[in-house]
Amino acid sequence: MKIVAIVLIIILSIVNVLLLGHIHAYKKEVSLDEKYLRDDKNILENRVIFQVKSSNDRVATTAMLKDENRNTHALSDIINNKDKFVLRFTENNCHSCVESMFRQLSEPAIGLKKEDVIILVSYSNMNSLKHLLEKYRFDGHIYNIDEKEMADNFAEKLNVPYFFVIKADGTERMAFFPEGPILYDLTEEYLKIVSETLHKQAAGSQ
């Protein structure tokens, strides 16, 4: 009997240890899930704040831009009194983030017309962008702007690539910062909304 009791005690002890291990692992998993939820919540809250703060950003329409052939254009001529959709990034931004944005922007389902899209960059050598443009078959407009022209803008201080709609007077609207997995998933919906908005404006002006 004593041997049986000892064996039972040993078995129960092992079971308890295993249960404690599972409980600890579960708590750790729940803790991680809670952390991810908090992180996602913080990301969303921060991006909403960023969008509000960047609503006063603008680019001087007198700013001079250079195209891929080094020809110079005033921003006002590029906008041409029509709202344009802008993908803005610099050579200091996260390259994989920029590539993700290009990939989503090039999706046919988005419905953006190339004449409505401006790629606005700040690069010391625009030739380094050729592989990116060719990879995603982008044949729209790409322009290089001196970073000083946008240095006072809130969005520029974040040092991340972002989207926005530029108005005829150079003001920025509908800014979107698709950094992080949760916001990347929302980018497609954002792009479709922008596309529909631009299409409606174009139809209304005819």
Image (tube, helix red, strand yellow):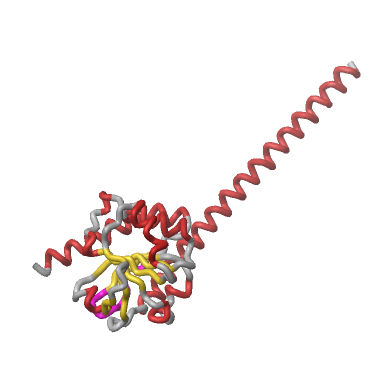
Residue drawn at 46 percent across, 56 percent down:
96
Magenta segment range?
A: 167-175
Residue 172 is inside the magenta segment: yes
Query: In the depicted view, which residue is nearer to us: 115 or 171?
Result: 115
Q: Position of residue 137 (x, y in %)?
A: 30, 53
Q: Nearer the viewer, residue 56 or 151?
A: 151
What quarter of the picture does the C terminus occupy?
A: bottom left
81 left or right of 98? Answer: left
Based on the displayed image, in which of its 4 quarters is residue 69 positioned?
bottom left
Residue 91: x %, y % from top left: 46, 67
Total residue callouts: 0
Query: Whole-percent x and y of residue 110?
Result: 27, 53
> Residue visible at 34% across and 57% down?
133
Task: Give the position of the N terminus as an image quadrant.
Answer: top right
Compare residues 81 and 13 and report the one nearer the observer. Answer: 81
Q: Is residue 87 visible?
A: yes
- Closer to the camera in the image, 19 or 163: 163
User: Residue visible at 35% across and 65% down?
Assistant: 87
Say whether residue 64 is left or right of residue 161.
left
Q: Which residue is found at the position 82% from the left and 22% from the top?
A: 8
Asked if residue 173 shows in the view, the reply is: no
